[in-house]
Image (cartoon, rainbow, N blue to C red):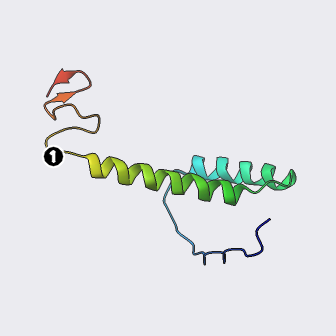
């Protein structure tokens, strides 16, 4: 058992724009999670952290002149532009 614990990192709030229907779904899920005693905020924070790491990896691997999937930009949805 560890005797020392790391200090919790200071948190801040971010705001993102989403469609109204997504906000309504999120509110419904939050209400359900709260009623079951579950921590939705912690789960969302973990998901954002994973998304950031994946985005950083994809950006680092990005080669100009290729699309998001690595195909030449002249190809879109399997066809030529």
Q: Is residue 72 above or below residue 8?
A: above
Left or right of residue 23: residue 58? left
Q: Nearer the viewer, residue 48 or 81?
A: 48
The residue depicted at 37 percent of the width and 54 percent of the height is 56
Q: Position of residue 4 (x, y in %)?
A: 73, 76
The residue tagged 1 is: 64
The residue depicted at 86 percent of the width and 53 percent of the height is 35
Q: Position of residue 72 (x, y in %)?
A: 16, 32
Q: Is residue 26 above or below residue 9?
A: above
Q: Nearer the viewer, residue 61 or 41?
A: 61
Spot the residue most to the right: 36
The residue depicted at 13 percent of the width and 31 percent of the height is 74
Q: Position of residue 20 (x, y in %)?
A: 56, 52
Which image quarter holds the C terminus? top left
Left or right of residue 40: residue 78? left
The residue depicted at 76 percent of the width and 57 percent of the height is 39
């Amino acid at each position: 058992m560890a005797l020392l614990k790391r200090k919790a990192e200071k948190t801040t709030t971010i705001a993102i724009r989403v469609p109204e229907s997504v906000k309504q779904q999120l509110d419904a899920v939050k209400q359900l999670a709260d009623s079951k005693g579950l921590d939705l905020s912690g789960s969302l924070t973990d998901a954002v952290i994973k998304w950031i790491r994946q985005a950083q990896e994809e950006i680092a691997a990005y080669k100009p002149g290729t699309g998001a999937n690595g195909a030449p930009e002249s190809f879109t949805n399997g066809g030529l532009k």
